[in-house]
Amino acid sequence: MNSKFDPIKETDNIISNIKKFRELKNITREQIADELELSASGYSKIERGEIELSVTRLLQIANILDVEVTQIINFDITTIFNISKNISMNDQVKVDLNTQNKNEYLEKYVKLLEKENEDLKSKLNII
């Protein structure tokens, strides 16, 4: 039988994905907080997982980030690219990426991952 669904781990992944989308789209915590009518520290608590993320909040954040909730839940590097065409083929979707923005997003994503690695190393006290 498959391993059990871990809601805490999945919630942590969703929160991490929200932060990735926010940073990749150059949106500040303050901007999202304003849109949500929260204080900046209140929104930061969401990104740190200190307060529970409701479905309503997730929908609001997805709207602010201009992404689908499913893109946040199932984060994939291709979901952040500007998609120029979706062509349906045998119940599959072929995605053509706008190459002008592809490199820009890849560079931002690499920097984001490098920052995450540094943060994790510092938490593990690795030099």
Image (cartoon, rainbow, N blue to C red):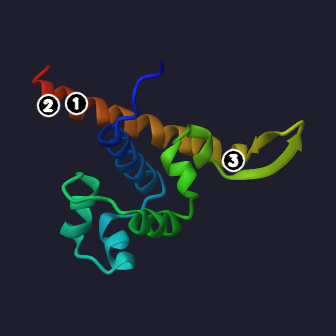
Whether tag 2 and tag 1 are in contact, CB under 8 A, the answer is yes
Query: Is 94 placed above or below 121 here?
Result: below
Q: Measuring 32% from the left and 37% from the top, which residue is drawn there?
A: 9
Amino acid identity at mark 2: Lys
Q: CA distance from mark 2 to mark 1?
A: 5 Å
| 119 sits to left or right of 105 | left
Q: Which residue is mark 2?
A: 123
Checking the image for residue 40, the label placed there is none
Amino acid identity at mark 1: Leu
Q: Which residue is mark 3?
A: 100
| 73 sits to left or right of 8 | right
Depth check: 57 or 81 in front?
A: 57
Depth check: 36 or 120 in front?
A: 36
| 87 sits to left or right of 75 | right
Q: Secondary structure at mark 2?
A: helix
Whether tag 3 and tag 2 are in contact, CB under 8 A, the answer is no
Q: Measuring 43% from the left and 59% from the top, which residue is drawn there?
A: 26
Query: Is 50 placed above or below 94 here?
Result: below
Checking the image for residue 120, the label placed there is 1
Neighbour tally class for label 1: few under 14, some 14-19, many 20 plus, Cα within 10 Å? few
3 or 1: tag closer to the N-terminus: 3
Neighbour tally class for label 3: few under 14, some 14-19, many 20 plus, Cα within 10 Å? few
Q: CA distance from mark 3 to mark 1?
A: 32 Å
Q: Secondary structure at mark 3?
A: helix
